[in-house]
Amino acid sequence: KTSYRQAWLYFLLIICLIATWWTPIRYAVSRIFMFRPTDVGPRDAYEFVALAYQGISSNPDELSPERFRAHFEALRKAGYHPITLRDITAFYRENRPLPRKAILMTFDHSRKSSYFDARSVLQRAGWQAVMFLWTKPIRDEDPSVLRWPYIRDMVLSKTWEIGGQGDDAFRQIPADPSGRLGNFMSTPRWIETAQRYETPEEFGARIEADIRVNHEEIVRQSGLKPLAYAFP
């Protein structure tokens, strides 16, 4: 009985050690084996291009994975070099130069298909990209968007950075008494119960509250402060 009890204690101890060290071990492995940034050459330029992909999927209205790979190879052959949000922050705040033919590649809406279709292409080439996170669908467990465990792995891989893109910001809201709808971020809301439009102060407070919810949820779930916000 003593031997049996000791074996279980050792087993539980090993499980606890694995649980404790799993994240730093995974982080170290990802840094050493999973991603090596490409050489971007000299940094003496003061301009860049931002390329935003709404979605990559087999949907006829969106960019197909095959077309994305063709885009990517065309950019590489044309001599473009990837940059990050940190590069952009240093460029604007400290006037630090960028690589020649710098390009910031971004993806919208926390899209699962975009991540899975782009990650191997980016990783093999040593390119980095940004995924802008729309948090309400993540919280609602929309099947088309990423879950937080995937997002945390994205950050650990060093291939991806994350930014904010609103919480309820893509919703359509009442825009006038007729029932017409308008964009959440740009439309003064019609308040039916009060028979009036929201005031400029109410409009600003609503927008600020949505941005704050998005920001706080990203920080809480990922442990990182997003460096950028993509206007919905």
Image (cartoon, rainbow, N blue to C red):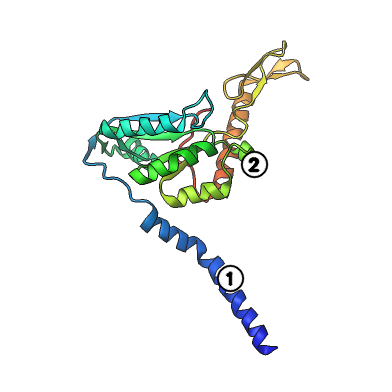
Label 2 crowd (10 A; few <14 / some 14-19 / many >=20): few
* Crowd class of label 1 (few under 14; some 14 to 19; many from 20; radius 10 Å): few
Q: Residue 1, percent across and down?
A: 70, 88
Q: Which residue extends farthest bottom?
A: 2
Q: Nearer the viewer, residue 85 or 158?
A: 158
Residue drawn at x 59%, y 38% is: 135
Kindly indicate the quadrant of the structure image that contains residue 206: top right
The reply, left or right, for residue 203 in relation to residue 194 is left
Q: Which residue extends farthest right?
A: 193
The Cα–Cα distance between marks 2 and 1, rounded to whole angstroms, is 29 Å
Amino acid at dot 1: Cys
- Secondary-structure class at tag 2: helix
Task: Check the image and report above or below for 6 versus 143.
Answer: below
Query: Which image quarter: residue 122?
Result: top left
Horizontal relation, residue 87 to residue 167: left or right: left
Q: Is residue 150 visible?
A: yes
Q: Secondary structure at mark 1?
A: helix
Disc 1 designates what residue?
16
User: To which residue does mark 2 refer?
Assistant: 139
Tell which of 162 and 30 is nearer to you: 30
Where is residue 181 drawn, in percent x and y?
Answer: 66, 17
Q: Position of residue 17 (x, y in %)?
A: 54, 71
Could you say where residue 170 lies in the image, as x and y percent from the top left? 60, 27
Q: Which quarter of the figure has residue 45?
A: top left
